[in-house]
Amino acid sequence: MATLSYGMIAVIVIFVIILLWGISTYNNLILLRERYNNGFSQIDVQLKRRYDLIPNLVETAKAYMKHENETLEAVIAARNSAYAAEQKVVGDPTDPAAMQALVSAESQLGGVLGRLMAVAESYPDLKANENMLALQEELTSTENKVSFARQAFNDTVTQFNTRREQFPAVMIAGMLGFKKAELFELTNEEERQAPAVKF
Amino acid sequence: MDFFSRQDVARRKTKWLVFYFILSVVVMILMIYAGAIVIHSFRNKVPLQKWHPDIFFAVTIGTLLVIILGSLYKVLALRDGGKVIAVMLGGQRINPATSIFVEQQLLNIVEEMALASGIPVPPVYLMKNEDGINAFAAGYLFDDAAIGVSHGALEYLNRDELQGIIAHEFSHILNGDMRLNIRLIGLLHGILLIAMIGYFTLRIVGFSSRGSSRNKKGSGGVIIVVLAIAFLLLVIGSIGQFFARLIKAAVSRQREFLADASAVQFTRNPDGIAGALKKIGGITQQSFLNSPEAETVSHMFFACGLKKLSFSGFATHPPLKARIQRIDKHFDGKFPKLQKAKKHSSQQPQKSKKSTSIPPILPGAAALPGFPNSIPLDPLLVVAAVGAPTAQHMDYAKRLLASLPHELRQATHDMFSARAVVFALLLDTDDSIRRAQIALIEASEGEPTMKETSRLFDLVQAQPTEYRLPLIQMVQTSLLSMTLPQFEQFRKTVNCIVKADQQLGMFEFVVQRSLILQLDRHFEKRRPPKVNYVAVQGIAKQAGELLSILVHAGHQDGQEAQTAFAQALSPLKLQPTVPLTPRKECSLSLLKDSLDVFVKSSPAIKKRLLGAAVVAVTTDGKVTVSEAELLRAIADSLDCPLPPIVPGVTSKK
């Protein structure tokens, strides 16, 4: 009986340790996932602000750039598709496909915005417009906030992915429904320069 | 009863809790042992014998191991502060820069209360899947607290009612209930684990033995024994659970009345919290929670979170009717029937956003009339207000927030700009030093941050100096969203800026002592210090130094300083008295050293020290802004939430 009892204790203790490990891994992953969700909400607020600013910017530019309708429409189209992609990510920030779509839409938007700014260079009246200057300033500061928040978001995503793929955790992460998270990385060179455009 | 004695009470309660807990563990061990010897005699067909040393030790060691492992694990997991619990319950952090009207309103309420009670603004979590009206506060200390609010609460309650609920939660934070709550969860988890093991073993063994019932006969006996033991564990674990829930409920219930009463005192508006309680009674979902984790933390909530209660001994909250009647004597027990309020349908936000998010901007430095550079006040009231802010502090916080320029307030809500706010506050007024500091910021944080800092510097400069402390409290919640590398960079930059002028100013000291220390705790999970000193005599030297620094900060004249020092020293009743440290030897590093000692003292000592500190700065009847900042730094170091020093509060004696 004694041997059985000690055996039982050993079994129970091992069982408890496995159980606790499982729960702790699960909770840890949940916490990390919440952290990158929160990271995305930091970006989200600024992106929304930016999507609100762009139509105003285009409206202001329209009055001066009579012959650049094509560029202006491209900006609006890119803004709308980026907005739609962003809505999808807000619905489920853990969905990698939605995040990829947003990243590419954002890169495109950055590209056309950069082009608009380049074209605007040749309209001195527009450059001097106070409204335009204020919008520009606001856009730049929003871009700065986005890039800081994006850095934080990517840090937290990397942390989550690393934790997810570490040895014992990797065995249950998939089972518990933790998908690999996607980075918010804008690789497009044109886009990177977009916020730097100055009058 | 003041803040310090409530802290003591919370600590004593923990001791009782541990006693009850040990008692139930002992009872459980004895019960398992009794079950085990019955199984033993039954299986080996020997007559029942009372004493089996080997079984007894096996049972004791096994049970203790499980409970200790389980409790330890849970307490460690919860040590990370309130956010862990918030996330466990399905909460999502509300972004400080949110554009949704009701969320903004909620954050405004929380911000006002945090400023009024002198604690950093806690992050707020929204439990999106909870349609009942409920809320909770969780955390280990003031600086890692989190507040959670259910979706239903935002949906149904108006501003006053929401404020009542939040005030109730704040009083839990200030009364030291949160730490007790977390310990409660931890201890009970160990007991829960015993029942869980029984349950899982029963499931697993029962399931696999059915599949292999044609196995060799020998294993059959073992399986029966294992099943019997598992069943035993399940039954006894459940009984243990039963008592554990009784303890938890009993501890929790008495504190709810206290928190309700403090909330009324705090907001001076009994209709707010009473209205919220009535609405809970009026909706079908009441305050019930859907989260499977709700049971574990049911005692942390504003109102009862569990739908099925077999009997009232389990209730973690007093009945709604009784709670309302304590606040509103005329309540007849009839709850209003409520329809889902269409409070934040999609069109509302834009409309009301303008009216609430842009506060009326009062003209510049004269924003708070009668707010001169020094404030007359009563030392007794200052100490009494620690952890128990009054409606006056609320009014003050409200006015302060309303007069803060919208742009500046917005900057505190975004982590990029919040950093810049801190940098801007630290910039020197001397042009050449400031230029060097700005260059430093550009070098370490980049051009965008540098530009934001310069922009905010002009805004910050235009504000009265009283705004510096509240701003520091406000940025903290945004800064928590940084990642560790970003925070490390931030801390490095702050250090560089502080060192740029070759001397440590009072405000710089406050930033390092309050903000950076608290962020450090968050990012590096540093634990609060243990109590080492329970007698003032042991730290007499440091007390003398601390008071000398305060006295010199407010008095130029040597004779005046001597008198003030003697007055400040008298409530400490030191024998023999310590001498006044000469002005030359008083430095902020000396202050830092003495504070490091006081952190480790008991609440009773902290109270006397803080009292003496207040006397030291008030003997001349005036408190300058830098004295107030120094007091705050001291209070923060001692983990005492010191409400803002409000002009014109005089003793009613």
Image (tube, coloured by chain):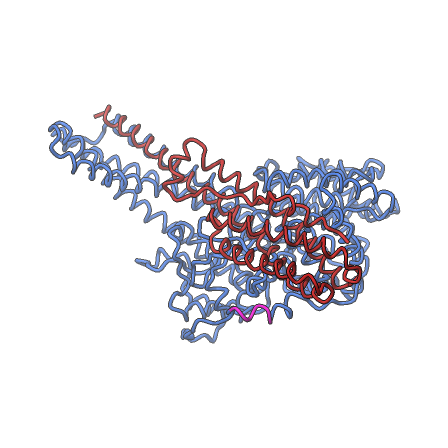
Q: Is residue B206 above or below residue B51?
A: below
Q: Residue extending furthest front?
A: A67
- Apparent side of residue B543 relative to residue B182 in the rendered image (left or right): right
Q: Residue extending furthest top?
A: A3
Return the x and y of residue B411 as percentages of the image width and height: 68, 55
- Apparent side of residue B591 relative to residue A105 in the rendered image (left or right): right
**Residue B637 is drawn in which quadrant?**
top right
Q: Is residue A158 above or below residue A113?
A: above
Query: Which residues, given as a range, are shown in magenta?
Result: B346-351
**Residue B317 is drawn in which quadrant?**
bottom left
Chain letter of the blue region = B
Image quadrant for the C terminus of chain A? bottom right
Residue B348 lies in the magenta stretch? yes
Q: Nearer the viewer, residue B608 or B414?
A: B414
Query: Residue placed at 84% from the left, 44% from the top?
Result: B435
Q: Nearer the viewer, residue B296 or B628?
A: B296
Chain letter of the red region = A
Image quadrant for the N terminus of chain A? top left
Total labels drawn: 0
Return the x and y of residue A106 as percentages of the image width and height: 58, 51
Q: Is residue B478 above or below residue B372?
A: above
Return the x and y of residue A171 as percentages of the image width and height: 38, 35
Q: Is residue B490 above or below residue B325?
A: above
Question: Can the viewer see residue B10 in this picture?
Answer: no
Return the x and y of residue B356 as percentages of the image width and height: 63, 68
- Apparent side of residue B195 relative to residue B544 in the rendered image (left or right): left
Residue A136 lies in the magenta stretch? no
Question: Can the viewer see residue A136 in this picture?
Answer: yes
Q: Nearer the viewer, residue B76 or B1?
A: B76
- Apparent side of residue B301 relative to residue B369 in the rendered image (left or right): left
Query: Residue placed at 59% from the left, 51% from the top?
Result: A108
Q: Nearer the viewer, residue B142 or A63?
A: A63
